[in-house]
Image (tube, rainbow, N blue to C red):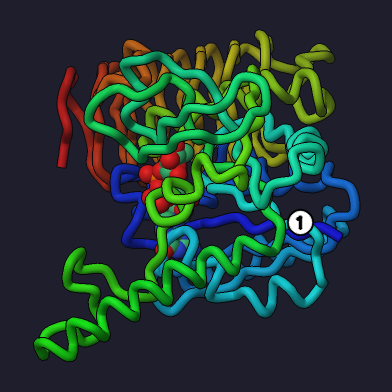
Amino acid sequence: KVVAVIMVGGPTKGTRFRPLSLNIPKPLFPLAGYPMVHHPISACKRIPNLAQIYLIGFYEEREFSLYVSSISNELKVPVRYLREDKPHGSAGGIYNFRDLIMEEDPSHIFLLNCDVCSSFPLPEMLEAHKRYGGIGTILVVKVSAESANQFGELVSDPVTNELLHYTEKPETFVSDRINCGVYVFTPDIFTAIQGVSTQRKDRANLRRVSSFEAMQLDTSRNIPTDYVRLDQDILSPLAGKKQLYIYETTHFWEQIKTPGMSLKCSVLYLSQFRHTTPHLLATGDGTKSAAIIGDVYIHPSAKVHPTAKIGPGVSISANARIGPGARLISCIILDGVEIKENAVVIHAIVGWKSSIGKWARVQASGDYNAKLGVTILGESVSVEDEVVVVNSIVLPHKTLNVGVQDEILL
Ligand code: GDD
């Protein structure tokens, strides 16, 4: 049997995702019409003998309860949310729930970060992992040398695929091969985590003998003894010991830390749907339908006027209304938004219940890495008729009656 664990973090993380994370836990923010965490969950469904999926985080239970029960029914695989009382780090989090995770007596445990966008080649990883015979296999991708330092950089043996060297977000360049935040382990991973935790406690105890300050903290690094990071504390020390291996993907992979990146990932998932689940995409067939260009998702409850022109790369959530002659390209339109006649939205995210007036324009350059490369409107923002908003971020509940460019409006 196999179980999968998805790390969803908590409200103190994901701050770069504001203003969108003010309304909804980041893992539930919709990409291509489905919550961010839905994409790794449905990828897990392809793993043979999958018995259970756990989401581990420190958000309130009730934030996930609805989603978890509906997705369990839909996938016919039990999905459960496990709440940490406080952050334990990416490895400490699974260690904390090891007894539950081991209840099914799994031979393998997948561990996935929730804030990555990928085709998640999980069955292929599992096959490779079994061939290698280590305790863990890491999904790896090649990125540009300039961007590699935002990730865990690693070096592997080109023949055996053994992980030889691992450094988390190094200051000087190590490698353009990086850790995708997707792993498969044997249950021995728990022994490795326990090792780190025990070492910390021992060190802390030693200090306590010599001074009174140590208490619960390993003062040398100011980290609680039960806080264990998978990357620095486990992967780095185990590299080069024939225990960890890599599986390199050439498919798409992105990390989702900012709202701008969520738009890029929404577009990527829409184009993946074209290959995997084309029935989820709008077709534009029928005389009463709007013109649809490329990959577009429209929630069944949304109302789109037949003279609107939508796509490519557009996702429209529940109860949105798109008026006559509106033009939408590369954007995420959230629940209850109203876009009035002849308005234009390009490279933008339009927050819940916002409204965009007649002939108004909400747009951006579409440079996902630039701070203002995607225009973001928070919840209930109102852009009045004919107003133009370019490369800007607008916080919730604002009314714009004059044009803005390159601004963050608080
Ligand atoms: N439940 C729980 N508890 N989840 C956590 C905790 C915790 O204490 N800490 C982090 N997470 C979750 C985050 O929500 C995220 O999904 C994942 O674990 C990793 O988050 P970070 O530890 O903050 O690392 P990162 O995202 O900056 O970088 C990691 O992922 C990159 C790939 O996206 C590293 O592993 C990098 O090496 C890697 O390249």
Front residue (pair 133, 283): 133
Position of the C terminus, as image quadrant, is: top left
Observer able to see residue 24: no
Q: Is residue 296 left or right of residue 105?
A: left
Q: Image quarter for residue 261?
A: top left
Residue located beneath label 1 in the image = 108
Spot occupied by residue 330 in the image (x, y as percentages of width and height) = 50, 17
In-front residue for pair 267/230: 230
Q: Nearer the viewer, residue 283 or 372?
A: 372
Give the residue displayed 51% in from the left and 19% down from the top.
142
Three-letter code, disc 1:
His
Q: Quadrant of residue 298?
A: top right
x 43%, y 37%: residue:
166
- Going by the image, does 303 lie left or right of 141? right
On screen, 211 above or below 258? Answer: below
* Residue at x 19% of width, y 28% of height: 401
Q: Position of residue 178 (x, y in %)?
A: 47, 29
Q: Is residue 121 above or below residue 55?
A: above
Q: Quadrant of the N terminus?
A: bottom right
x, y percent for residue 99:
67, 79
Query: Which residue is pictured at 54% across the width and 56% down the height?
Result: 7
Under circle 1, the secondary element is: strand
Mark 1 Cβ inside 8 Å of ligand 1: no
Q: Nearer the viewer, residue 220 or 274?
A: 220
Q: Name the spot of residue 46 as percent of width and height, x first.
A: 84, 42
Indicate the quadrant where residue 392 lies. Answer: top left
